[in-house]
Image (cartoon, rainbow, N blue to C red):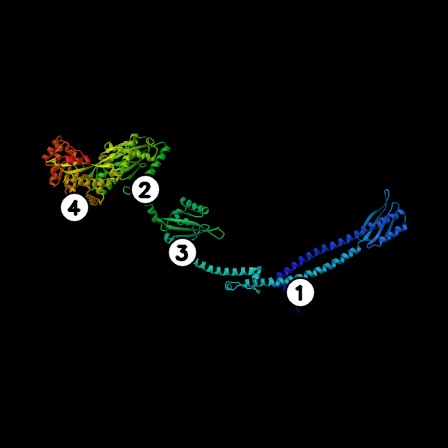
Amino acid sequence: MPTLSNRFQRFRQASPLSFRLLAWILLFSSAFSLIASAIQIYSDYREDLNQIERHLEVVESGYASSLSKSLWSLDSALLRTQMEGILSLPDIVHLRLRQPDSELVLGDMPRNAKTRSHSFKLTHEGDQSIKLGELTVTADLTRLHLELKRKVGVILATQFLKTFFVSILIIWIFRHFVTRHLSDMADYARKLSLSTASEPLQLQRADTPTNRMDELGQVTDAINQMRERLHEDVKRQERDAAEIRKFSKVIEQSPSSVLICDRQWRIEFANHKFMQLTGYKPESIRGRHPGSLDPSAFNSRENQQLWQSIRLQVQRVGVWQGEVNSTRKNGERFWEQLIVTPIKDNEGNTSGFLILGEDISIRKRYEQQLLRQANYDVLTGLPNRMLALDRLKLALAQAQRERSMVGVMFLDLDNFKHINDTLGHDAGDSLLVEAARRISSCLRGTSTVARLGGDEFLVILPGLPEKESADQVAERILQTFTPPYVLNGQEVFVTTSIGIATFPDDSKNCGTLLQHADAAMYQAKHKGKSAFAHFTPEMTEVSQDRLQMESRLRRALELRELELNFQPIVHTKSGHLCAVEALLRWRNPAMGMVMPDRFIPLAEETGLIIPIGEWVLENACRAAVRWKQISGQDIAISVNVSPRQFRDPSFPEVVMRILAECGLAPELLELEITERLLLDNSIETAEILRELDRAGVRLSVDDFGTGYSALSYLKSYPFDTLKIDKSFVQDVMKEPEDASLVKAIINMAHSLGLRVIAEGVEEEAQTHFLRQEGCDFSQGFFYSHPLPNQDFEEWLRTNERVQA
């Protein structure tokens, strides 16, 4: 039969928490019971003690008067009887009566016992109070102490038993409702594993809402949630493992090279792309610093500064990216885009570094090419306008610091447009390349020559000691243009006009210096070309006038400021009208009547000649239709056409559209083409001329003899008429050379089947000469000045030379 100690030992082993709880309950319950009992015993003891003290006070109140009378009357027997009566009271063991001359004692004073005494005076009250004596009453507390000991024993025994049995009951309740379930939880937790995670924890108690809401229910729910999370973590780990394998493949198959280094920048991993990019195998570089892969550059100052900068920026910012000129294993150099980032652990500490690389050699070549295209002229290789302006700004800043001068030269090739129109664009490009070479040969290393566009060049001369130093450079440039240019096997002489502006005399502003140099260049052209000119303040007005004219010309069509004048072309023999030339005039409210030689070159430069030419052609054709209504006969109209219009392949379509809209027969329209167009021996020009000829439009060579005499080209194109320039006609009666030249032109034109028109006929003698030499038609002031439309229509109505 198991003993009580064995049972207790099993209980302690089965439920250590219950045992500890029992011990703490007994400890604290006993302490609390002792404190409570002590307070209760002490309270009872004080109550009994107070009761004895009240008895002593009752003795005073009950016997003081009678004792005082006995003493006053000197009745000793009565006094003793009264004192014996007091001594017979409970707990009173001793009386002491002190009188002035004697002392009376009754009873025995106990030894080694606690007592309590009370004294009061005995007095006689008469006319005055007389003190008779003092009585001291002593009570024994032995009975009170014995009662106290009995109570302490009883209370301690009852409190201990009560505490013990209540604790046992609490432990049983705690065991039934708590600890046995905790044991089940512990057993479940010990058995919990990945294989048993699917089985939930269930306690052996009723599944009620109250039980689910208490602490055991919450712990059970928490354990089951933990089980579910564990189950999910297992699945997540499996997925993470799959992701890690996938990411490992991604890194290995990444199009970018990947290096992983430890905290000391020692290479731990390199992917396949890195091997392809550099030629290094992972085992040969593992443990090495990334910057040491190129032994020749590892100890260089630049390489050390680069990796020091990478380390600092990664520490401060968290990422470094930039372009590095790296080296392959075979020594080949290539450009690489690097991104370096730290690898953080779970605590946020750097555990390594990730280096991503990409070969950008092709992109760098494209960038350099784009940079060159953005800053250099494609044709000549010279700096373009953007780069030239940057260099000019730097030169001005340096000159301001050094208190030196900067020369700015604006160059424009003379007659470039004429050569480009006649010889073609290929010849024009060759001319520009050679011109750029000649200009560059005249400059020192610190100077800059740039092409601003078209045939305009800019020369920057920094650090000039004096203003006249720019003149020497300008003279050298002009001399280099003296030898002829060979274009398409033909020698061509081209000159240049140079405008010079100086910093800081002419301006301290970059843009203003260019404007002043441009104005000086136009002044050089006015001096006769192949010259240079320095800027003067008066030139600003000329430059502003040109800008103002361009601005006004752009609005001339819109404001209807352009008008046509008409000059008759007559038969030289009879003087009768055969055709009319349309001459363009510009009547501006601010500038007055502007002649074509002032604004036509500007219109050709700006491209405005295209819409203006269409307007002239349309209004001239409409005028010819009205003239037939006035005169009753067909009158041909002659219109000047700019070479710029012939660059447009759709020009024949424009001509035929205007003829159709106006209702004019093609053979009544004659297009006058300048002689320089003949030298543009291009397929496009020839096809346009032939297409117009097939359509019935007549073609005429204007101002023949003033430009390049391309006589061989006359038979190559379908021309109908040749016009002799007025500069030859006006002196035929004075200069034998001009007379001989006019005769030769007439004979040559007739031999080619061309009709001849003489321009600038102003004297009757000239008409006789032309008639004698067989000139077909004449035109000039002798017959009529150019007339506005209304005046010319009146001339048609009244002039007798107008007849069929």
Dot in front, 3 or 4? 4
The quadrant of the image that shows the N terminus is bottom right
Task: Reply above or below: 357 against 640.
Answer: below
Q: Is residue 311 left or right of residue 713?
A: right
The residue tagged 1 is 5
The residue tagged 4 is 694
The residue tagged 3 is 250
Dot in front, 2 or 4? 4
Residue 574 picture location, percent across and down: 10, 36
Q: Nearer the viewer, residue 34 or 77?
A: 77
- Label pair 3/4, CB-CB below 8 angstroms: no
Amino acid identity at mark 1: Ser
- Label pair 2/3, CB-CB below 8 angstroms: no
Identify which residue is drawn at 32% across, 43% down: 374
Mark number for residue 375? 2
Question: Disc 2 versus disc 4: distance between alpha carbons?
Answer: 48 Å
Of the image marks 3 and 4, the number of the one nearer the N terminus: 3
The quadrant of the image that shows the C terminus is top left
Of the image marks 1 and 3, the number of the one nearer the N terminus: 1
